[in-house]
Image (cartoon, rainbow, N blue to C red):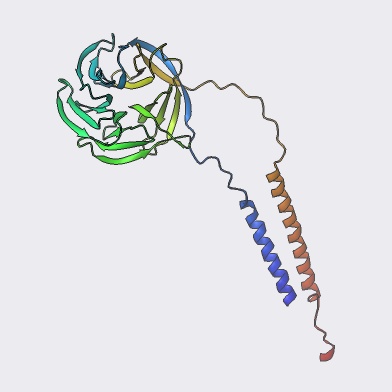
Amino acid sequence: MLGRRRVLSVFITALFLLSSTPIIGAQDDDSSYVRAESLLVVVQGNVSHDSAAYTQGLEFHQGRLFESTGLYGNSTLREVNLSSGSVIRSVDLNASEFGEGMTFVDDEIIQLTWQEGIAYRYQMDTFDIVGNYTFEGEGWGLVYDGHQLIMSNRTDVLTIRNASTFEIEGTLNVTLNGEPLSKINEMEIWEGILLANIYQTEEIVGIDLNSGVAILHIDASGLRPQGAGVMNGIAFDSTTQSLWITGKEWPMMYNVTFIEPDVPSEPEPEVESPSSDDENFIYSNVLLAIMLAAIVILLAMNLKDGGRNPPDGGALE
């Protein structure tokens, strides 16, 4: 009986090893993040832009174009003629204030300052200040998604703010291909996605507002004019369904669309020989199968012969 129990114990152990073996080494999963789709910018047209404008915010409202400009002593909020690039009207910030991103909330405009910790609220038609707010840290980009304000501040964390009180209501961590994405600058809502310039690059990203994951990575290289500053400024005109981009001190503003890049055809992949991990997996399974077969045979022999060491029955006869 003891011999049978030993054989049965070995048998159960082998079965356990055999059933668990496929799990070993099955943790190689490189899909732990969403890789952003790569797109290219295609220019559909262009218009003139004030080459003296240090663009910090750009936005259409009811077909009219508005812009926030920066630099100490030159910061403004302005309405711009889209066709000519000329300034229709403007209001200056204090010389000690550096203008940053701006956005519309209904018929009012909110404009950030860079390091002064102040946001101004203007009436659209008069540019009269109807309120102001204070905040901590730097002000970079600002956009309104129809419910809340979204503000960038150089870091990879966007701040979600109440559109009426400017109070913080949440944050959103932004990643690109699994890595934190900082230097998010001027922003725009486009087709439900948050488009954003990445400061000091010629890249635009499209961010999912639920997860903070950049699902689009857009190459806008080649548009920056000679001698101009960095790209900064994205505006969507809902009246014409057109998307526009420009930059700091750019003489042009471009109407753009996005396309997928051409991917060159690749030769047929060669059939690869099994990797060492695959060979080890097959080898271990073969060994386990041999062990299992041997155990089954031994068990059958024990059952047939009444055990390897049957008791001596002579004394009982």
Q: In this view, does 109 lie to the left or right of 28?
A: left
Residue at x 30% of width, y 41% of height: 170
Residue 214 picture location, percent across and down: 43, 33
Quadrant for the C terminus, please: bottom right
Residue 274 image-quadrant placement: top right
Q: Is residue 21 left or right of residue 260?
A: right
Residue 147 picture location, percent across and down: 26, 35
Residue at x 27% of width, y 24% of height: 98
Residue at the extreme right of the image, as rendered: 314
Residue 54 image-quadrant placement: top left
Quadrant for the N terminus, please: bottom right
Residue 85 picture location, percent across and down: 28, 11
Residue at x 70% of width, y 41% of height: 275
Q: Which of 276 and 87 is in front in this view?
A: 87
**Residue 190 visible, this angle:** no
Residue 56 picture location, percent across and down: 31, 22
**Residue 117 visible, this angle:** yes
Residue at x 41% of width, y 19% of height: 257
Residue 163 image-quadrant placement: top left
In this rendering, is residue 23 above or below 235?
below
